[in-house]
Image (cartoon, rainbow, N blue to C red):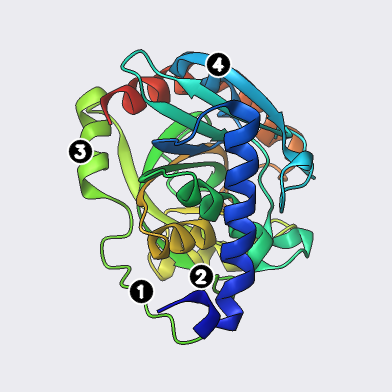
Amino acid sequence: MTTAEHPAAAEPTQLANAAAAHIARSTGVERHDLALVLGSGWGEAAGLIGEITAVVNAADVPGFSAPAVEGHVGTLTSIRTPDGKNVLVLGSRTHFYEGKGVRAVVHGVRTAAATGARTVVLTNGCGGLNEAWAPGTPVLISDHINLTAASPLEGATFVDLTDLYSERLRAVARAVDPTLAEGVYAQFTGPHYETPAEVQYAKRIGADLVGMSTALEAIAARAAGLEVFGISLVTNLAAGISPVPLSHAEVIEAGQAAGPRISRLLADIIAKM
């Protein structure tokens, strides 16, 4: 069925195609094999994956804008791995709380699919509900709970999310580091941090991690036919579990401290995908 038969879906698809065409012209890479969305703390991974062949200002690409959050970069980077794969690194992430709408939030993963990517790696910095996970702990995402009361899908678009976060890719990650824990990620709307009561609610309904990104992107990625791999960096214990008040400065500091180690881990995982 064509996008013309689904007017609500036409604009996001056309915008993603336009962005992909711009990326192909700007990078000289006709097709990317894998896309990587870098969240707080994960920025150093880009330089470890392979050779950077092109860097594009995100604000110049249709549908993208400069990042609104400290710790994110405003570029799209094309990297060639040692085995010849082309990786598109999306450093410019739009968050739900920016008020630009869900289409803007998931435009990056839709663009990744339009470039030809078959796999997307979603990373984030998050609050941990497990006291054993100290700040700096990487955790594989096994599932998510979407608490935004929104969906990137429009109209009668029914997508199965039973195995949204690829078991195959999680097995790849565990082969690289058998000590990796995994858990369920709950996306809140933000930008305020969760209250202690909300954290306890999330814990009771099955969450191990709380944050403000990833879930909506993962849904859109699955709808676009991408295989999804998610990994979180615990930057702080969540409200009511942490003995100190939460701050974004703490998130940045934890990400910087863990950056070299988790970036090397992520690069090693991507090399095996």
Q: Is residue 239 visible?
A: no
Whether tag 1 and tag 3 are in contact, CB under 8 A, the answer is: no
Whether tag 2 and tag 4 are in contact, CB under 8 A, the answer is: no
Neighbour class for label 3 at 10 Å: few (<14), some, many (≥20)?
few
Inter-mark Cα distance, 1 to 3 = 24 Å
Image quarter hosting the C terminus:
top left
Neighbour class for label 1 at 10 Å: few (<14), some, many (≥20)?
few
Query: N-terminal of the two: label 4 or label 1?
Result: 4
Q: Residue at x 45, y 64 (%)?
A: 219
Could you tell me residue 98's position as x and y percent?
A: 77, 58
**In this figure, which residue is indicated by the disc labeled 4?**
52
Query: N-terminal of the two: label 3 or label 4?
Result: 4
Image quarter hosting the N terminus:
bottom left
Type of the residue with mark 4: Ile
Type of the residue with mark 2: Tyr
**In this figure, which residue is indicated by the disc labeled 1?**
159
The image's mark for residue 171 is 3
Position of 225 relative to 166 (above/below): below
* Mark 3 residue element: helix
**In this figure, which residue is indicated by the disc labeled 2?**
201
Neighbour class for label 2 at 10 Å: few (<14), some, many (≥20)?
few
